[in-house]
Image (cartoon, helix red, strand yellow):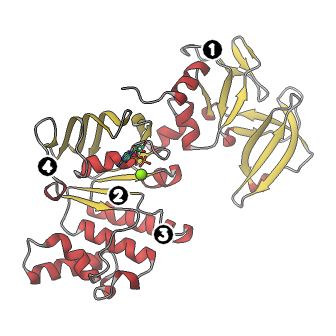
Amino acid sequence: MSSLVFKNVRHRYDREYSVNIDRLEVAAGKLVCLLGPSGCGKSTTLRLAAGLESPLEGEIQIDGEVMANDSIFVGSEDRRVGLVFQDYALFPHLSVQDNVGFGLSHLSRADRRRQSLAMLETVGMQGSADKYPHMLSGGEQQRVALARALAPNPRVLLMDEPFSGLDVVLRNRVRDETLALLKKMGTTVLMVTHDPEEAMRMADEIVLMQGGRIIQQGSPGALYSQPVNAFAASFLGDVNRVPVTAVGECYETDLGPVPAAPDIDGPVTEILVRPEAIRFLPAVDAAAPTGEVALSRNLGAFCLVDILFKSGFRATARVATLHQPIVGETCSIALNLDGVFIFPSAANAQKANNPVSN
Ligand code: ADP
Ligand code: MG
């Protein structure tokens, strides 16, 4: 059963749609990430789910109940959703415990206290119950914000860029802890992020947005390995854009021939290749694509290696550090076709530039 459903939901602030979603579902107990570039409509989608914004068209349901449509609008306070924002939005004049108890006003004083403390214990902050937000670090404030959102036992937790205020080291830890807690509690979550790595790390399912629309929806692996267009391919990870020099049975490229895909609708002028799909052969092989190592950057676990081909085309490969090629060395490569994506060029350009139509 789906906890949160959007059907034909459209919303706009001015002429163009900020959100134009035919269907979005968040299944009970799942963590779904809305992912996309700045301005693509992620926060607006979240605000629509929260009841902070009323859709112009369409229907929003939570646990099968209509929250918004042409005739119904349930306000944020009655939706039983939890909210966590980037800046945590804790009340500065309330203690940590009172912040967490804020959404529990229906309970007696004693019950509120008990439940707030229990929730603080769950997030490992029971020792700070009497402190005030300004006395806490960013990571601690984040945990209090999470405790406050979860205390009233929301049907859906909505989080907008909840980790972006944390420094990199802390972010990874808080992210992992938060994910473990949400999974343990079985919370249904819709989370916004512009960071593909964060989405892949946390999400059961990623919803990729562009210009208010959903471009692709699926598991992190599916989005990375089976992108539906060039935008999806390049948003989820690095790609080399490799020019096609001739087309026959295969697309001929500096990285070797790639079997032509029969069902491509339109001319193909370039193929997309993930850096890890370029494999170095153990020895120079005249029959294989061959170039010169132009740059080699050691990033610890792997190296990024630029290969310069005779045509002047330069591709970046990602290889294990153990086999770091040396600059100036001649090398031959092979392609792993799992990391090669082919899209019709005209459609790519059109999709990438397509403004949201009304
Ligand atoms: P994201 O969270 O993906 O960065 P938003 O949902 O905040 O994107 O914004 C989507 C679009 O709606 C953007 O073009 C933005 O300028 C516009 N927008 C968002 N909020 C408002 C607002 N309150 N008034 C006018 N336009 C807005
Ligand atoms: Mg936003």
Judging by the rendered image, the residue that carries numbered circle 3 is 173
Residue that lies at the very extreme toward the front in this rendered image: 14
Q: Earlier in the sequence, mark 2 or mark 4?
A: 4
Judging by the rendered image, the residue that carries numbered circle 4 is 74
Crowding at dot 2, Cα within 10 Å, few <14 / some 14-19 / many 20+, comes out as many
Q: Position of residue 43 (x, y in %)?
A: 37, 50
Q: Earlier in the sequence, mark 1 or mark 3?
A: 3
Q: Position of residue 358 (x, y in %)?
A: 36, 26
Along the line of sight, the residue nearer the viewer: 119 or 56: 56
Name which residue lies at 51% across and 26% down.
Answer: 351
Residue 159's disc number: 2
Judging by the rendered image, the residue that carries numbered circle 1 is 267
- Cα separation between marks 2 and 3: 17 Å
Q: Find residue 285 and report its image quarter.
A: top right
Residue 319's disc number: none
Q: Earlier in the sequence, mark 1 or mark 2?
A: 2
Residue type (three-letter) at the residue carrying disc 3: Arg
Task: Give the number of callouts.
Answer: 4
- Cα separation between marks 2 and 4: 19 Å
Residue type (three-letter) at the residue carrying disc 2: Met
Q: Is mark 2 within 8 Å of ligand 2?
A: no
Quarter of the rendering occupied by the N terminus: top left
